[in-house]
Amino acid sequence: MGILDALSHQFIDVIEWMDARPEDMVYQFPVKGREIKLGAQCIVRESQAAVFFRDGKALDVLGPGRHTLSTMNIPLLTKLLAIPFGGNSPFKAEVFFVNLKEFTDQRWGTPTPVMMRDPEFGPVRLRAFGAYAFEVGDPQLFVNKVVGTANLFTTDQISEFLKRMIVTRFVDLIGEMKIPALDLAGKYDELSAAGKAKIEQDFKAYGVRAKAFYLQSISLPEEVEKALDKRTQMGVIGDLGKYTQYQTAEAIRDAANNPGGGNFAGMGAGIGAGAVIGQAMAGAMQPKPPVGAGAAGACGHAVPPGSRFCPTCGTGIAAAAGAFCASCGTAVPAGGRFCPGCGKAV
């Protein structure tokens, strides 16, 4: 083999990228130090684009298909028709293959809690997490602004940069929408759509296109969640007096079903004390009757004049002045000896 034949084998005549991994975005071809032969073929697959560089300047972007370099001075790249191969004149150039597939299941999240002002709770801290998908929208711009001269570029090298942009825009979005913390769970679709619109312009400036953006969870600090749990429990309990009566009845049933039963008396005393305390608490939490409203029941509610029982809690009421007739229950005025209702002596 002659010297010229040996040199000709050092020139590249087929340019392609075949073994892309799922995370690979850009691959630079050829191997450093080798030159491309005039008439070389560039094979670009359906999910790829090839950016042709010469002397450090991007000259053309090739779409899917088989292309042939037809001139040495100005690289005019055309689809291969019936152009014969010929010429061994080499020249130095680079071809960056760009993966145009959609990169899905990319994760984002707030590294630290984000402060927001809630109309009900005041200042609260939130954490948010989600997923997004993107693709290269402008191969030439992406190579020039992001990839540079790297021989291989993967999603790991850009994911942190994209996540920082996402978090910045999402924090701004939360502040603009002013959604109460308790209502955020019902606004995931709206927040996701608005978040995608927020990041699209930022991504576009780097040759990247946002394909999807999802908000998956928003969480409050642990102490706030505990306080909300207690508030929910109180809302479920409702009437504290009825809840205390229910718990007393449950405790009595459990004590009756206790095989030992030895400490039932003491347990009953404790239950009774608990019931009294519960009723006192319930009464304290109920609104007090206005001055001059007459008698009041154990619950504190006003009782209409002449009533023998409280209409709210059912406790018996003594007559404010005098007594009640034993036969018909009519109130007898103070000093009265006969019932004004039935005429019987009282």
Image: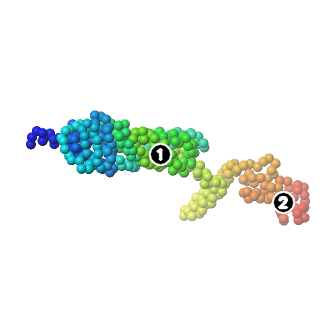
> What is the number of the mark on residue 208?
none
Q: Residue furthest left?
A: 1
Identify which residue is drawn at 16% across, 42% down: 9
Q: Is residue 317 above or below residue 56?
A: below
As drawn, is 80 to the left or to the right of 289?
left
Marks 1, 2: nearer the viewer: 1
Identify which residue is drawn at 55% across, 43% down: 177
Mark 1 vs mark 2, CA separation in Å: 76 Å
Can see residue 227? no
As drawn, is 9 to the left or to the right of 229?
left
Amino acid at pointer 1: Lys
Q: Quadrant of residue 7?
A: top left
Residue 196: give x, y in percent of width and height: 47, 45
Identify which residue is drawn at 57% across, 43% down: 178
Residue 325: give x, y in percent of width and height: 85, 62
* Residue carrying label 1: 196
* Closest to the observer, 309 or 150: 150
* Closest to the observer, 76 or 269: 76
- State the count of labels: 2
Q: From the image, which quarter does the N terminus lie in?
A: top left
What kind of element bears circle 1? helix
What kind of element bears circle 2? strand
* Residue carrying label 2: 324
